[in-house]
Image (tube, grey):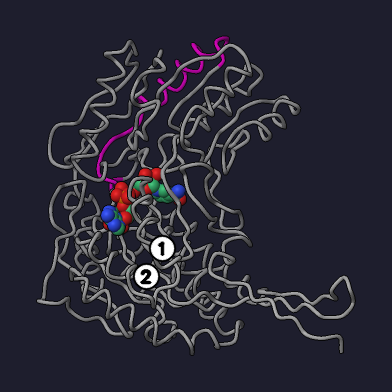
């Protein structure tokens, strides 16, 4: 383990040079009307590498007035884009998919630099994020309505679908590419124009991707990008303006709740992809090899910084010792370090606040009776690293059983009966995803019926797929991204009554 290793010590000696060249290609302005331009007052902010704490570049910092310029651009471009033939919209998205795959090395490296995840995972995100472009290119040509006779036979009902209008898309830092494509692709496929506000910690991937959209021929004004450190005022300016017709947000539940209130006066369409507190249930009849492998993926993917990260491990009492021993052995062998270094599983957390949060949650659990099987500490030195950690005997009143950990901490507790497992799993205000390991078909079916969750991994540790409706129940959100459901979020229905011909 050597988290102080940075790109500068790349054994091939090429990473530093590639990094400089790549950062030189990332647009550093705001994208408005198809042109990259400076922010009002030439204001900029720094984007840093969480593996070193060192600055990468400075980019334009949009003001509320800049944001309104971007909205005006999206509004002007909307009527023409909405009339572009679906096939043409589809082919532009498909071209963006191809271009993203062709440039996967650049996108993967850029994500690792600004967000920290191991390079291998960044390649996975390029593949996953790209699939939304391909999927929605295929959905753009399948927007359909219906025609029917009224029950009385006196009229005809025509139902048609129309793009909702200019959309405001806010993305989080943890999946800089996929959270952008998961919104931009269905919006464009539906005929909507967009203003995107990426997370200020990781704006670079979105800007490079927006340039790809321009390069493949997406018309000026269809996609506008406003990186900003003033999320609140920028969002308020846009949401208070009647030209915006839809808000799609991915981020934490508290911010989502505020934004819903902001969107209420304009009665905006909203999609909310919010926080999670995923249970991971291992029943006595589980395939233990599969459960251990699934647990490691469900917990440590993205260094634990995923809304879908398994947060609470409930393991049947008959298996808990063996399960704990096996995950502990695997986790103790994880290598921690800069995501650009080969062999690393645990990259840096996004910032020092995230490290402090993991530290506090572990300390709280230990104070209440949990035992540390491995890890448990922040790592000294530059960058924001926390050791991959396994906690056993975690009591129900530990804070990390209620809050998203958002760090590499695997917290294990036990249950005796199926009813108890269901009660524990559902005992949260969140309902994004649940993981279930069982070989009993009837039990699996009961879990589908009884778990209060928008998504379920049945004997698998990752559920995300562009063809499936991603989204949560309860305070985990509203709406769905991906699947045939994903494009409907950007369409509005019109019913026309015509007389009996
Ligand atoms: P966050 O809520 O702090 O920020 C998300 C985005 O909102 C960022 O672009 C941020 O700049 C912006 N923002 C922050 N405050 C704002 C405000 N007052 N007004 C308008 N915009 C504001 O979340 P985060 O820390 O970036 O991301 C982590 C959270 O996102 C976790 O809770 C995670 O579960 C959630 N998440 C959910 C999904 C999902 O699909 N359900 C996916 C990824 C992340």
Q: Nearer the viewer, mark 1 or mark 2?
A: 1
Which residue sits at x=63%, y=62%?
484
Which residue sits at x=66%, y=19%?
285
Image height of 10 relative to 459, above or below: below
Disc 1 CB within 8 Å of nearest ligand 1 atom:
no
Indicate left or right for 491 with 232 as reference: right
Residue 339 among those drawn in magenta = yes
Q: Which disc is residue 209 wearing?
A: 2
Residue located beneath label 1 in the image: 180
* Numbered-mark total: 2
The image position of residue 136, as x and y in percent, is: 57, 69
Give the Cα separation between the discs numbered 1 and 2. Answer: 9 Å
**Relative to the observer, which residue lies in front, 196 or 295?**
196
**Relative to the observer, which residue lies in front, 395 or 393?**
395
Which residue sits at x=57%, y=25%?
289
Q: Which disc is residue 55 wearing?
A: none
Image quadrant holding the C terminus, namely: bottom right
Is residue 73 in view? yes
Is residue 173 in view? no
Quadrant of residue 159 within the rendered picture: bottom right
The image position of residue 330, as x and y in percent, is: 42, 25
Quadrant of residue 305 within the rendered picture: top left
The image position of residue 378, as x and y in percent, is: 20, 29
Indicate left or right for 461 with 29 as reference: right
Crowding near the residue tagged with mark 1, few <14, some 14–19, many ≥20 C-alpha atoms within 10 Å? many
Indicate left or right for 401 with 141 as reference: left
Q: State which region is magenta.
A: 316-341
Circles 1 and 2 in contact, beta carbons < 8 Å: yes
Crowding near the residue tagged with mark 2, few <14, some 14–19, many ≥20 C-alpha atoms within 10 Å? many
Residue 300 among those drawn in magenta = no
Image height of 256 relative to 70, above or below: above
Image height of 181 relative to 221, above or below: above
């Amino acid at each position: 383990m050597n988290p102080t290793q940075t790109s500068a010590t790349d054994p091939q000696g090429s990473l530093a040079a590639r990094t400089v060249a790549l950062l030189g290609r990332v647009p550093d302005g705001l994208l408005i009307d198809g042109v990259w331009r400076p922010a009002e007052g030439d204001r900029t902010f720094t984007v840093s590498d969480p593996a070193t704490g060192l600055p990468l570049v400075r980019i334009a910092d949009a003001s509320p007035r800049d944001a309104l310029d971007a909205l005006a651009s999206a509004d002007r471009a909307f009527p023409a884009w909405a009339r572009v033939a679906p096939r043409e919209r589809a082919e532009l998205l498909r071209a963006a998919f191809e271009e993203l795959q062709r440039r996967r090395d650049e996108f993967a490296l850029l994500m690792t630099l600004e967000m920290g995840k191991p390079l291998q995972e960044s390649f996975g995100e390029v593949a996953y994020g790209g699939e939304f472009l391909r999927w929605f290119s295929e959905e753009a040509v399948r927007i359909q309505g219906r025609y029917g006779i009224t029950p009385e036979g006196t009229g005809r009902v025509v139902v048609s679908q129309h793009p909702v209008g200019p959309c405001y898309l806010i993305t989080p830092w943890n999946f800089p590419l996929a959270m952008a494509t998961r919104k931009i692709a269905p919006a464009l496929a539906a005929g909507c124009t967009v203003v995107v506000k990426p997370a200020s910690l990781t704006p670079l991937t979105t800007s490079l991707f927006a340039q790809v959209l321009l390069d493949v021929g997406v018309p000026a004004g269809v996609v506008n990008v406003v990186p900003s450190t003033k999320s609140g005022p920028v969002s308020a300016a846009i949401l208070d303006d009647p030209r915006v017709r839809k808000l799609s947000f991915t981020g934490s539940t508290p911010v989502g709740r505020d934004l819903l209130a902001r969107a209420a006066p304009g009665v905006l369409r909203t999609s909310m992809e919010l926080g999670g507190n995923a249970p991971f249930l291992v029943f006595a009849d589980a395939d233990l090899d599969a459960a251990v492998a699934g647990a490691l993926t469900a917990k440590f993917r993205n260094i634990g910084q995923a809304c879908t990260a398994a947060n609470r491990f409930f393991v049947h009492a008959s298996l808990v010792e063996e399960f704990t021993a096996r995950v502990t052995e695997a986790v103790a062998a994880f290598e921690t370090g800069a995501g650009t270094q080969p062999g690393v599983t645990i990259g840096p957390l996004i910032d020092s606040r995230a490290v402090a949060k993991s530290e506090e949650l572990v300390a709280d659990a230990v104070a209440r009776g949990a035992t540390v099987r491995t890890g448990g500490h922040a790592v000294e030195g530059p960058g924001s690293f926390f050791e991959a950690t396994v906690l056993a005997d975690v009591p129900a009143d530990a804070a990390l059983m209620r809050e998203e950990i958002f760090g590499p901490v695997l917290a294990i507790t036990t249950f005796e009966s199926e009813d108890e497992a269901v009660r524990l799993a559902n005992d949260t205000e969140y309902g994004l995803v649940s993981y279930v390991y069982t070989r009993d078909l009837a039990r699996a079916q009961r879990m589908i019926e009884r778990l209060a969750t928008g998504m379920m991994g049945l004997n698998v540790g990752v559920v995300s797929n562009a063809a499936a409706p991603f989204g949560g129940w309860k305070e985990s959100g509203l709406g769905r991204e991906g699947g045939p459901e994903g494009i409907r979020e950007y369409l509005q229905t019109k019913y026309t009554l015509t007389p009996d011909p």
